[in-house]
């Protein structure tokens, strides 16, 4: 976590090798999907052009909100709120 705080604090994108080392350290070298739970991490990944599989939680949430909103489409505020 400290590594993420340092990246956020400095505003600098780490080198690809540094980020890859961090991921290898955290996963034990296993090739498993990485969950990007911090809003800045997808931006870092995009900038580094990382080949690994990542799950961007912001994108997952946004897609779920669209699905939810489409299901609620046409209902009045008395019938249900999108919140």
Image (spheres, grey):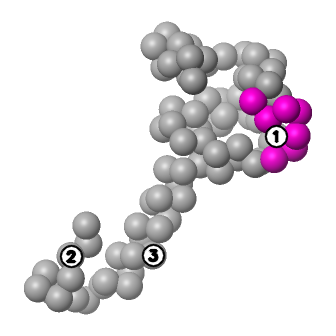
Q: Main secondary structure of the magenta part?
A: loop
Say which quarter of the image contains residue 7: top right
> x, y (%) of residue 65?
41, 67
Closer mark to the observer between disc 2 and disc 1: 2
**Residue 22 visible in image:** yes
Residue drawn 74% across the image and 23% down it: 22
Residues at marks 3 and 1, CA–CA distance in whole angstroms: 28 Å
Residue designated by label 3: 67
Q: Sequence-wise, which precedes: disc 2 or disc 3?
A: 3
Would residue 27 be counted in the magenta stretch? yes
Residue drawn 57% across the image and 24% down it: 1
Q: Sequence-wise, which precedes: disc 2 or disc 1?
A: 1
The quadrant of the image that shows the C terminus is bottom left
**Residue 42 horizontal side relative to residue 48, left or right:** left
Please say if the residues under marks 2 and 3 sit with CB atoms less than 8 Å apart.
no
Dot 2 falls on a residue whose secondary structure is loop
Q: Sequence-wise, which precedes: disc 3 or disc 1?
A: 1
Dot 3 falls on a residue whose secondary structure is helix
> x, y (%) of residue 8?
48, 20
Residue designated by label 1: 51
Q: Nearer the viewer, residue 14 or 32?
A: 32
Q: Nearer the viewer, residue 8 or 73?
A: 8
Please say if the residues under marks 2 and 1 sit with CB atoms less than 8 Å apart.
no
Q: Is residue 46 above or below residue 64?
A: above
Q: Is residue 53 above or below residue 4?
A: below
Residue drawn 60% across the image and 17% down it: 3
Would residue 63 be counted in the magenta stretch? no
Residue designated by label 2: 81
Residues at marks 2 and 3, CA–CA distance in whole angstroms: 14 Å
Question: Magenta segment, which residues?
Answer: 26-32
Q: Which mark is residue 34?
A: none
Residue drawn 82% across the image and 28% down it: 24
């Amino acid at each position: 976590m400290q590594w993420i705080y340092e990246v956020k604090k400095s505003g600098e994108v780490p080198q690809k090798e540094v980020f890859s080392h961090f991921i290898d350290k955290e996963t034990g070298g296993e090739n498993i999907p990485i969950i990007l739970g911090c809003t800045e991490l997808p931006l870092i990944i995009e900038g580094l052009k990382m080949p690994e599989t990542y799950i961007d939680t912001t994108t997952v949430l946004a897609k779920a909100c669209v699905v939810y909103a489409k299901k609620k489409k046409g209902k009045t505020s008395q019938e249900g709120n999108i919140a």
